[in-house]
Image (tube, grey):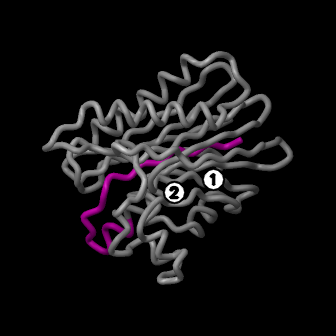
Amino acid sequence: MLVGIYSDQGAREYNEDSCTVFKKGNLLCAIMADGLGGHGGGDIASRTAVDVIKNNVKKAGQVDDITQSQFNSWFEQANASIVAIQNRECQMKTTLAVLCMNVVSGKVSFAHLGDSRIYHFLDGKEIFCTFDHSVSRMAVLAGEISIDEVRFHKDRSKLLKVVGKENFSPPEFGNTIVNHDHKHAFLLCTDGFWEYVTEQEMEDTLIQSEHPEDWIKKMYKILKNKVREENIHNDNNSAIAIFF
């Protein structure tokens, strides 16, 4: 099991992304959150969400994997914690993506709200990506735009489900099992990352990388080059990479 992680404020005044990776018993847990800048307090919201999930995982007993009901409860607690510190001037909200893997059995469970993504790669090829809870992603379903047009669509920042709403939406849940017969890689990242690194570039750099830190460095270089060449005032960008 190999892990790489980074978070960068991009061209923003401060970083509203929060992320962490930790191990508890046989469980490896990765958490990614992206505070919504337009609502104020995004950094507080993302840190709060990460802390709530981390504390709950650490308080959980020795389990083989995290169930959907546990994720629902923990996301609801994160939602309530953020709502409790909101005020009229600061309606802080955040995306939240969580992946937990049993490093012995290979059981993987994950959940998310918003447009921070979880990717799964098998032998260097993308086989899964979470569904963005955004207006632009719904436009793809409606046949109005292509999946590639989501990256810079005018409504890409309009999210339909996030953490920090009065009416809580349960997270989208998924699970899988990984084994030693194949090379598995997982990538958790915020929209400030995947907007500039295509899935093809993720695959190309993954094949060239022996360690997740190398993979992240290669992808981050692609991101920085695009931002520099196009003179873009880019968003915070963060990623967690896991090799199994």
Asked if residue 231 is among those painted magenta in the image, a careful observer would answer: yes
Return the x and y of residue 16 as percentages of the image width and height: 30, 44
Mark 2 belongs to which amino acid? Lys
Task: State left or right for residue 217 relative to residue 62.
Answer: left
Asked where in the image residue 3 lies, by quadrant, the reply is: top right
In percent of the image, x 63 and y 53: which residue is there?
Answer: 209
What element does badge 1 sit on? loop
For disc 2, the marked residue is 218
Q: Earlier in the sequence, mark 1 or mark 2?
A: 1
As drawn, the label of residue 166 is: none
In percent of the image, x 44 and y 53: which residue is there?
Answer: 114
Point out the stretch of residues depicted in magenta: 225-244
As drawn, the label of residue 209 is: 1
In percent of the image, x 48 and y 51: which residue is there?
Answer: 189
Of residues 202 and 190, the one drawn nearer to the viewer in this rendering: 190
Name, please, the residue furthest toward the bottom.
144
Task: State left or right for residue 230 relative to residue 77.
Answer: left
